[in-house]
Image (cartoon, rainbow, N blue to C red):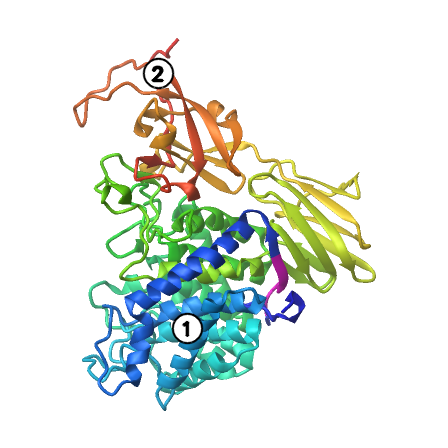
Amino acid sequence: MTSKQVKPLAGAVRTASGAVRPVPGARITGGLLHHWQRRNSTATIPHTIEQLRAAGNVANLSRLLEQDPAPYRGRYPFLDTDLYKTLEGLAYELGDGDAPEPVREFYEEVVGLLERVQAEDGYLNSFFQDPAATRKPWQDLAWGHELYNLGHLIQAAVAAGRRMGDDRLLRVAGRFADLVVERFAETGVCGHPEVEMALVELYRETGERAYLDLAGAFVDRRGAGQLKHSIFPGDYFQDHVPFRELPSVTGHAVRMAYLAAGAADVFLETGDRSLFEALERLWDDMVAAKLYVTGGLGSRHSDEAIGDRYELPSERAYSETCAAIAVMQWAWRMFLATGGAKYLDVFERVLYNAYAVGLSADGKAFFYDNPLQRRPDHEQRSGAEDGGEPLRRAWFGCPCCPPNIVRWMAQLADYLAAERDGALLVASYASARIESAGLDLAMETAYPWDGDVRLTVERAADGPYALVLRIPGWARGATVTVNGEPHAGDPEDGWLTVERRWSAGDEIRLALPMPVRAHGSHPSLDATRGAVAVARGPLVYCVEQQDSPAAAVDDLLVGVPEIVNANIERRDGTVVLGVTACAAPPPSAELYPELPLEQALPETTVTATFVPYFLWGNRGPEAMRVWVRTPMTTGKKAT
């Protein structure tokens, strides 16, 4: 199936109120993102299928066909969603036509089971359909996750319909959705938002207005006290005040970002300005005070929640991988709504850092939470080779993150470009082919390792057409040439526009300077005061103990001049940074020693190698830091 035959996914249709619309005709052909997608196909998907079988997710469905079914396997009532998220990713693989036969066999098996076990009224949930279940359907909306299950089923179904032309899951999902429309016509809301996005997508696919109306109702019902707040208070569920009145992103991080993404979808179809005003306020607050430098969201382990403003501890960062995906979903929808480049800057930061770190280099092990610091005496002292637990795990009792990685990795090409009448906007850079209404482009680049991007026009519409290139917020002094001639325009609000009558063979060269950058933090962010983070391009870097043999990473002192003058080195296809640092003297044994009037900088210098944060933890469970101490003195300075 070629890209021109593929219908768009993930909100990629023309919306009623969007400033731009996504371009579905894109395929990633090379570079880092292509490597990630190949790894997804060859390693992560086969591993995920194996784990889903071993954990009982498939058996939980097939047992419902037995006269005396075996007990449900797993402690959570939402484990069907792991199958649905995987099916969504498989729809891309199968739609591209190059998936191995075991992948198709798994897809066919699970789709067939879902068709057979669905109840006559359309209900579908292998936990609550168990004849021996003590909890009944719709009995516990706060924790039952039945509508959350439906949301992921719908998204898998829409993907299968658009990518494969297979409408079997759409019929299953539609029957369940119709039941929900009837059941929740007047009251009720799910404890875990997600279905809102899916219902809007089902409306886009079918034109059935009831799905859109229910999505909007779910957004507006939250905060009215319809959920039973057990274990955690109402703000955990974003249910303490109405969504439009939320003063700040709060509560469970994944729930918050899914809810916001769903609300953005509702806005995109209804044009409800008060809804957008709330979304914009919440987004700006999140970016200003609640997002990690990696783009991670969520600083509390106890309730997987977003903390207070500036509560961003490094070693206790929760920053769940699912929250990273949810933030990207929200960011993309805000971009569709406004055409704003600032949302794509966050999207990109999350993609290459908070999201990418969740998967091991071999594609078969996962982080659930993603800290920015690991201390040398962390309880996880030994690796798998020593009989201990590896840093990343093959699977989890609550395995929401692995199949979420699978589906998101499979659909990365959907987020490369967008268009509006008379213009193609390049949102992200990767070696790829992009087919739009006005231009077909071949894009070649080694991004994110360097900022040189070459775009070649393969087909052009008649008449003038604008090519609009995103200039990331970190890029200073970007330049563009067209057929070797400098383009005189300047970036505006994160975009550089080249408009002309194009011909096949025209070549556009974009140069994005990528110096090494040193980032500090807001003075209210106590956890990183007196520390500095290292970045280059969209990548945040960290130092692992393996790359600082002469000094403990906790004792490194790195200055801004040394960072910006770091040695840039290519190593096994990766850009690493050699930074000259000071090695602090051994600290006092006292926890709170009295400071001297004069304190000199240490004289010992060492070299530390900084690696991309997304690669940490692949060589063993040693100490790691994103935020490294920076020299601070009182009194005289060292000579």
Q: Kindly identify which numbered label has been placed on residue 601.
A: 2
| Amino acid type for the residue under numbered disc 1 | Gly
- Give me the residue at 23% from left, 39% from top: 381
User: Does the magenta-highlighted stretch encompass residue 417?
Assistant: no
**Residue 84 appears anywhere in the view:** yes
Pick the residue in front: 458 or 418. Answer: 458
Residue 54 position in % (x across, y down) = 30, 65
Q: Which residues are magenta?
A: 17-27
Quadrant showing the N terminus: bottom right
Q: Residue furthest left?
A: 590
Specify the amino acid type for callout 2.
Answer: Leu
Give the tally of numbered discs: 2
Mark 2–mark 1 CB contact (< 8 Å): no
Residue 637 drawn above or below residue 572: above
Identify the image quadrant of the C terminus: top left
Coordinates of residue 283 in the picture (x, y in percent): 46, 55
- Residue identifier under label 1: 151
Residue 499 vs residue 634, the one in the foreground: 499
Instruction: Give the number of the mark in front: 2 or 1.
Output: 1
Instruction: Name which quarter of the figure residue 110 lies in.
Output: bottom left
SS type, badge 2 = loop
Whether 26 is among the magenta residues is: yes
Considering depth in this image, is 245 or 68 the residue closer to the camera?
Answer: 68
Residue at the farthest front position: 101
Up the image or down, 95 lies above or below 449; here it is below
